[in-house]
Amino acid sequence: GVTGWTQMKEYQDGVAEVEAVRAEFETKLAGMSAADILKDEGLSAYTVASAKVLFGDNCAACHGRNGQGGPGFPVLVDDDWLFGGTIENIEQTITGGRKGVMIAHGKILTPEEVDELAKAVVEGKPTSSPLFLQKGCIACHGMDGKGMALLGAANLADSIYRFEPEGDQSILDSVKYTIMHGVNDVSDPQTREAVMPAFGERLSGDEIKKLSVY
């Protein structure tokens, strides 16, 4: 009409207004570390809100829309972390990816030994079995069985499982399977596969900071 109004122009004006508001926050973000962002309540809230789309586009396919995890993929909304849960650890994980390794023990242990270790793990008392020390489990999972973040070795004493049972499996069956076939062990065709891709090649530094905070 005579005023020159169009729906597209109104949309573009609206986008421009939003971008103007975002610009102040985005400028601040660019010069801050993820740890510093967390210390700023307002900036942290903005970052969490603006990272929802990033998470949906890059993370939700494996970890679920709300970070609740998926078949074979970790939950992100609890406080259990294989490689450490500091903001720096999380940023490193997103940037460089992760690929932990657990050797398949089915070729090392007898079925009875697998049963004994698996039962100790399910009871949350991995060190209660002498085999935990004798078979070298302490090398990765520590003397107390609570894992080593440096290696991505799981805490075996908290009853939180990286691999949930599938189908008719019990938790005990699932733990036994992991012990027998390991994780990312190329020598065992039945090994568990657990690879987190590196996002440093596809996302900007600011996007990775946002996801880390999120």
Image (cartoon, rainbow, N blue to C red):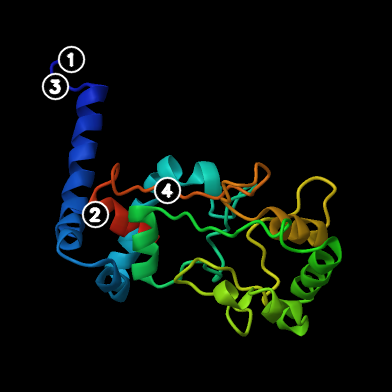
Asked whether residue 81 is in view, the answer is yes
Q: Please report the residue visible at 37 percent of the width from the left and 48 percent of the height from the top.
A: 198
Per the model, the C-alpha gap separating discs 2 and 3 is 41 Å
Q: Position of residue 195 (x, y in %)?
A: 50, 49
Per the model, the C-alpha gap separating discs 2 and 1 is 43 Å
Sequence-first disc among 2 and 3: 3
Instruction: Write down the residue under mark 3.
Output: 3
Instruction: Write down the residue under mark 2.
Output: 206
Sequence-first disc among 4 and 3: 3
Say what amino acid the circle numbered 1 marks.
Gly
Say what amino acid the circle numbered 3 marks.
Thr
What quarter of the picture does the N terminus occupy? top left
Asked whether, in this view, residue 110 is left or right of residue 68, the answer is right
Q: Position of residue 131 (x, y in %)?
A: 75, 77
Instruction: Write down the residue under mark 4.
Output: 55
Taking depth in this image into account, of 104 and 175 the one nearest to the observer is 104
Sequence-first disc among 2 and 1: 1
Mark 2 residue crowding within 10 angstroms, few (<14) / some (14–19) / many (20+) = some
What quarter of the picture does the C terminus occupy? bottom left
